[in-house]
Amino acid sequence: MLEVRGVRKAYDSPQGRVQVLDGVDLDLGPGESLALMGESGSGKSTLLHLIAGLDRADAGSICLDGVDVSTLGEGSRARYRREDVGVVFQQFNLVPSLTVAENLALQARLARRLDPAWQAHLTTALGLEDLLERLPEQLSGGQQQRVAVGRALALRPKLLLADEPTGNLDEATAEQVLALLLARVAESGSALLMVTHSNSLAARLQHQLKLSRGTVVRA
């Protein structure tokens, strides 16, 4: 389903050009899960953003179901982000003017894929029933994290991308969220790519991959 080949990405800095990714390869099939690990600054979040179509690689290819995301025009990339990929951002990226219920439904509604029964299931599974009318500013960090996870899952995407999705959650809720992500992958044939610093969480996924200084090393 997901095939990444020779991906390179560099950014300008006051110290000069910084090579963040330097020839990264990975594969992820339908129904599979992969933990992306590595120290801070190793390129994990950058790779996730490239796969999500939020930025373009300098070189290499990123293909989902045979379509190279890096070759898509702006309109097609926007449709790809809206319909094919569910992203759980490290900083949540909830819409501040929308309620929890509206944030949960937002991407699925834009993709014309809103399923009220599925959203109700996610709301209960994530413990958000009593928070639906609140705005993001009225939530704790952990509650915002759960809304972000629910928004990504509500889409029923082909590919789930999660950047430290349990980082702001207590241990019990983190386990519940991970179980929900893995169950979604198992039941739908979608794929999960998760950035995590936790060895114990990474071990729950089928595959592990480690980045170091922008290249893949053995996990």
Image (cartoon, grey):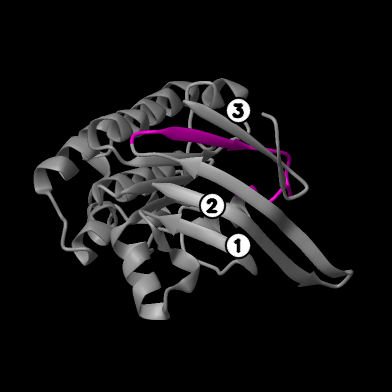
Identified at 56% across, 69% down, the residue is 56
- Which numbered marker is on residue 60? 1
Q: Which residues are magenta?
A: 31-44
Q: Is residue 98 visible?
A: no
Q: Residue 102 placed where, x, y %?
A: 24, 58
Check whether the beta carbons of the residues at disc 1 and disc 2 lie within 8 A of each other: yes
For the residues carrying marks 3 and 2, which lies nearer the camera in this image?
2
Q: Residue 87 placed where, x, y %?
A: 42, 52
Q: Amino acid at mark 2?
A: Val
Residue 36 lies in the magenta-colored region? yes
211 displayed left or right of 194: right
Label 3 and label 2: CA atoms lie apart by 24 Å
The one nearer the camera, 130 or 184, is: 184
Circle 1 SS class: strand
Q: Going from the N terminus, do you reach mark 3 or mark 2 first? A: 2
Q: Residue 83 placed where, x, y %?
A: 28, 61
196 displayed left or right of 123: right
Q: Residue 16 placed where, x, y %?
A: 87, 71
Residue 58 lies in the magenta-colored region? no
Identified at 73% across, 44% down, the residue is 40
For the residues carrying marks 1 and 3, which lies nearer the camera in this image?
1
Mark 1 crowd level (few <14, some 14–19, many ≥20, 10 Å Cα): some
198 displayed left or right of 75: right
Q: Outermost residue, bottom direction?
A: 74
Q: Amino acid at mark 1?
A: Gly
Q: Is residue 29 visible?
A: yes
Q: Amino acid at mark 3?
A: Ser
Above or below — where is 186 with respect to 143?
A: above
Q: Which residue is mark 3?
A: 198
Q: Which residue is mark 2?
A: 4
Identified at 38% across, 57% down, the residue is 66
Label 1 and label 2: CA atoms lie apart by 8 Å
